[in-house]
Amino acid sequence: MSTNERKKGESIDALLRRFKRKVKNDGKLQELRRREYFEKPSEEKKRKAKAAAQRTKTQQQADELT
């Protein structure tokens, strides 16, 4: 669980913004959404393969530009 200590003179809004940014950067919310439902091992493999293919495609396009 992510925690933030309130700094002296910091408003609640600023504290909330820092907390949200920390949670987003940690990937905890994304992980929670992914684990909301059971994912069969075959579906997980398909998802990971698709993500790897997308990363490869993006990297190749970036390499072509340079």
Image (cartoon, grey):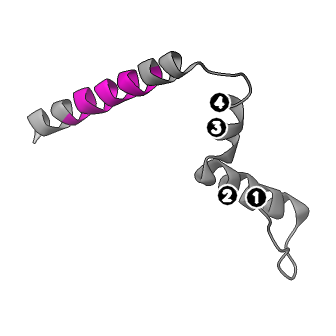
Residue that appears at 36% across and 24% down: 49
Disc 2 crowd rating (10 Å Cα; few below 14, some 14-19, many 20+) is some
Q: Residues within 10 Å of mark 4 (few under 14, many from 20)?
A: few
> Mark 4 falls on what kind of element?
helix
* Mark 3 or 1: the one toward you: 3
Q: How far apart are marks 1 and 2 (CA)?
A: 5 Å
- Between disc 3 and disc 4, the foreground one is 4
Q: What residue type is labelled 1?
A: Phe
Evaluate if marks 3 and 4 touch, with contact meaning CB atoms under 8 Å apart.
yes
Decide which of tag 3 and tag 2 comes sooner along the chain: 2
Which residue is identified by label 4?
34
Name the residue that disc number 1 marks.
19
Residue 66 found in image quarter: top left
Count the numbered circles shown.
4
Q: Say which label, 1 or 4, has the lower sequence index.
A: 1
Q: Name the residue under label 2.
A: 22
- Residue 19 appears in which quarter of the rendering? bottom right
Q: Mark 3 points at which residue?
A: 30
Nearer the camera: disc 3 or disc 2: 3
Q: Do the residues labelled 1 and 2 touch (CB within 8 Å)?
A: yes
Sequence-earlier tag: 2 or 4: 2
Residue placed most toward the observer, 24 or 50:
50
Rendering coords of residue 64 (x, y %): 10, 33
Crowdedness of circle 1 by 10 Å Cα count: few (<14), some, many (20+)?
Answer: some
Task: Tell me, yes or no, whether the highlighted magenta stretch contains residue 23.
Answer: no
Q: Which of 3 and 34 is in front in this view?
A: 34
Q: Give the CA separation, mark 3 to mark 1.
A: 15 Å
Q: Give the range drawn in magenta.
A: 47-59
Q: Which mark is residue 38?
A: none
